[in-house]
Image: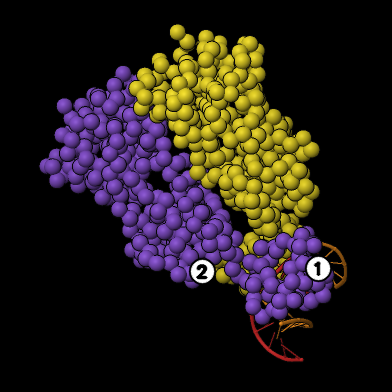
Chain colours: A purple, B yellow, C red, D orange
Amino acid sequence: MATIYQVSELAGVSLSTVSRVLNENDYVSKKTKQKVLDAMKQLGYQPNSIARSLASNCSNSVGVLVSELDGPFFGEMMSAIEAQLRAAGKHVIITPGHSEEDKEKNGLEFLISRNCDAIIAHVEAVTDDYLVELNKGKTPIFLISRYVEQMKENCISLDNVMGGYLATKHLLDLGHRDITYIAGPLFKPDAADRLTGHKKALNEYNIHFDEQSLYVGDFKETGGYNGLKHFFENKKQFTAIVCANDEMASGVMKCAREHNFELPKDLAIIGFDNVHFTSYLYPTLTTIDNPVEQMGKMAANLVLRDIYKQNRADIEHIFSPNLMMRDSTPRSN
Amino acid sequence: MATIYQVSELAGVSLSTVSRVLNENDYVSKKTKQKVLDAMKQLGYQPNSIARSLASNCSNSVGVLVSELDGPFFGEMMSAIEAQLRAAGKHVIITPGHSEEDKEKNGLEFLISRNCDAIIAHVEAVTDDYLVELNKGKTPIFLISRYVEQMKENCISLDNVMGGYLATKHLLDLGHRDITYIAGPLFKPDAADRLTGHKKALNEYNIHFDEQSLYVGDFKETGGYNGLKHFFENKKQFTAIVCANDEMASGVMKCAREHNFELPKDLAIIGFDNVHFTSYLYPTLTTIDNPVEQMGKMAANLVLRDIYKQNRADIEHIFSPNLMMRDSTPRSN
DNA sequence: TTGTAAGCGTTATCAA
DNA sequence: TTGATAACGCTTACAA
């Protein structure tokens, strides 16, 4: 690999001059610049970003921590963040946190030690205090899909309470009164908030929230599958079910079908997130649209503005979910 | 951020000694080691991996290039690679190639300039020659789900021809004779090979391959949706359809349903890849199992063996696909 | 077992 | 507009 030094020799200029053309510094004559460019081309020179990063203390890369590398939700999130950042010439270093405190801390530390200029994190297990503290360090932390009061300027979040509310209200408006709920792991803020919204809607309709109607799942298909099975085993009577995310809703569909339910007729099902595949399920899934892509883009813009000093109009910190009405939620009969 | 220098001062030892304990070099007395460890703790020292990487020319990180950051197939691939590598204390830098030549090259160059010790790439648009050439450079390239003869020792691939063959043969065995095919973009080796397998199966049954029965999709849901629509518009008669991946199969399902098909009765559908969601579709999708997770793990092991000199038993270079029989492919009537 | 000092490939500060 | 030269934080011969 050619270095800046060899380029400078071939071009007959000094190291600094080569560095200048590399950094598009204007104080280089056209002639010299061309000489350097030619030398670079001839040697197939590729700047070593590690060295640049060490010397400049700026890596042009932002760390991204997501819970999982697979799964439709995080896929859309990563993809949106990456696209926006790449368009601005920044790179992304992605690492998974697996929703476990140790692993999240680990991932965050990795990104910091990698000299990321900033971090966009979707963390679920780590405490607010830890984040506030970490954010005081050399690497600014931005949170996506999480709200922490003391660093709210660095947060892009979704009104999950509202989302949970909308989902349940939709079912109530359709005439359903016996509604079960499959939550995500309640230590996760998203999951807890959505459940709060659910209760709020019930409350508005003067319906008592019954612990028997709650099952805590894992945000995966199996969580939904097992949840519905659980309700069946407990001989719960209900006409509608709210799932705290779409994967669980699709697990519910599978289980319902295995119990010879005809869908959507025999059970109204609503999901949450509106991930891509929901419109390909049968019946198409009614769900709450979670604008992850917009949020990812916004988080990237926030970093671009605050860290890279680019002009970005109108940062929006809190997003609102919307009801996506499809076929899985029939009126109660 | 504390540096190794400050640690050395506080511990009253030299830089090299600190470096030694950092690298778990044995030539350090227990006592000194403890002093250093204490100092590190007190200062909250975090090694700067950029600097380490520059000095040692080893980053303990491997670059991963996948076509997309979202989508179930790549999710599973990334996740498997990352998990295996992380278990060995290595980190992963992921970047997308978007199946475009420029972007793939770009991503590859980024990973190289980032001092990755090796690269695991799922590339589709770049030529074999380019890869062979690139692999001669400082960063070894390993290919996943692609076979290049001149660097076959660095390839982990799937027998896609066999996969395509199995899919179509399954339908033929069920009595279907009018079979359409929705391919992926044919410049992608995977897509081309699967189609070859399809033709081979037809040939074995003395069925003429008809260009009218082929639609080239995009490996996304819309590709399947549009493909089926295309066949309908051309008044094609057929009882079964092969899709070159699962996303397209789910698009086909959606389109069929919109045309009032009753599934699986009115149309046999088979997919390819066996991504996670296929067993949550309705009807559950018969498909060809693509062992991406195993392949990802194997690619990681290959890197661990060749680059990090770890003992890894039995590297398997070529994987075989398997038929996953489910409910979407009824017998022809 | 420990320390000294020369890199690693850049950027950045001066001075020219 | 250009060039020396000292960082950046660490590893790694080589010496002690």
- On residue A308, the disc is 2
Q: In the image, is residue B166 above or below residue B102?
A: above
Q: Write down the chain letter for disc 2.
A: A
Of labels 1 and 2, earlier in sequence is 1
For the point 72% across and 66% down, the residue is B17
Neighbours of disc 2 within 10 Å: few (<14), some (14-19), many (20+): some
> In the rendered image, which quarter is residue A214 located in?
top left
> Helix, strand or loop at disc 2?
loop
For the point 81% across and 68% down, the residue is A6
* Residue sitting at the far front: B234
> In the rendered image, which quarter is residue C14 located in?
bottom right
For the point 51% across and 66% down, the residue is A139
- On residue A6, the disc is 1
Neighbours of disc 1 within 10 Å: few (<14), some (14-19), many (20+): some
Q: Is the residue at mark 1 from the same chain as the one at mark 2?
A: yes
Q: In the image, is residue B95 above or below residue B282?
A: below
> Residue A333: x, y in percent?
16, 27
> Residue B242: x, y in percent?
53, 23
Q: Amino acid at mark 2?
A: Tyr
For the point 53% across and 33% down, the residue is B217
A226 with respect to B292 (left or right): left
The residue nearer to you, when weighing B236 against A228, is B236
Q: Amino acid at mark 1?
A: Gln
Q: In the image, is residue B253 above or below residue A130?
A: above
The residue nearer to you, when weighing B72 against B227, is B227
> Helix, strand or loop at disc 1?
helix
Q: Write down the chain letter for disc 1.
A: A
Work out which quarter of the rendered image holds the N terminus of chain A and state it. Answer: bottom right
- On residue B325, the disc is none
